[in-house]
Image: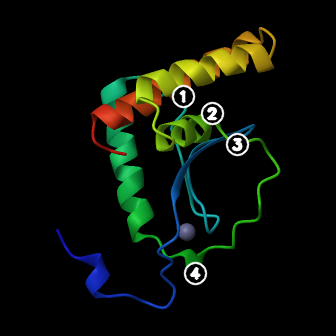
Amino acid sequence: MKDEHSKPTASQNPARELLWTIEHHFRGWTCSQCEWKEAVPTLLNDPDAKTAFDRLAIAKFRKHNCADHAIRLPSSGAESFTARIRKLVSKGFKPKDAVELVVQEVSIEYAGDHTAVAQAQDEGEDFLRRLRSGLI
Ligand SMILES: [Zn+2]
């Protein structure tokens, strides 16, 4: 393990965060500070393969230099369900309860829109899987 903190550079932003992002044409990891992104392969369904992809994306995220990318503009889209789950967990909810709560909220908010509910469930499962794998 190399210690990245020993070589700080002016362009490094300690406040940057790896975000799970789902938009109309994109699904994958993004940086909170710049336009760096790593799209998840669309055919990735196997949990182990997903975890391997996440590991790789996290490693790439740590290595990227925000200065090499355009500055991220504030997103006009709604925050991902994952972001909502994370918020609840940071407030002290157990991860599993947070996932259930967000799925319940989504099924009310989207009034039975099965696609939205399925996506919330999907993101919830991914969230718990990453937690179990020690990725987040
Ligand atoms: Zn960045």
Badge 4 residue CB within 8 Å of ligand 1:
no
Write down the residue under mark 1. 123
Q: Earlier in the sequence, mark 4 or mark 2?
A: 4
Distance from the alpha carbon under mark 4 to that under mark 2: 28 Å
Assess disc 4: are there few (<14), some (14-19) or many (≥20) residues with their C-alpha within 10 Å of its C-alpha. some
Residue 105 image position (x, y, % from top left): 69, 20
Residue 81 - label: 2
Tell me which residue sits at (69%, 73%) in the image. Answer: 71
Assess disc 2: are there few (<14), some (14-19) or many (≥20) residues with their C-alpha within 10 Å of its C-alpha. many
Write down the residue under mark 4. 67
Q: Nearer the viewer, residue 124 or 63?
A: 124
Assess disc 3: are there few (<14), some (14-19) or many (≥20) residues with their C-alpha within 10 Å of its C-alpha. few
Task: Tell me the amino acid under the disc marked 2.
Answer: Phe
Locate residue 131 relative to residue 72 in the image: left or right. left
Q: Earlier in the sequence, mark 1 or mark 3?
A: 3
Distance from the alpha carbon under mark 4 to that under mark 1: 30 Å
Write down the residue under mark 3. 79
Badge 3 residue CB within 8 Å of ligand 1:
no
Query: Under tag 1, what secondary structure?
Result: helix
Q: Quadrant of the N terminus?
A: bottom left
Distance from the alpha carbon under mark 1 to that under mark 3: 12 Å
Tell whether label 1 touches label 2 (CB within 8 Å): yes
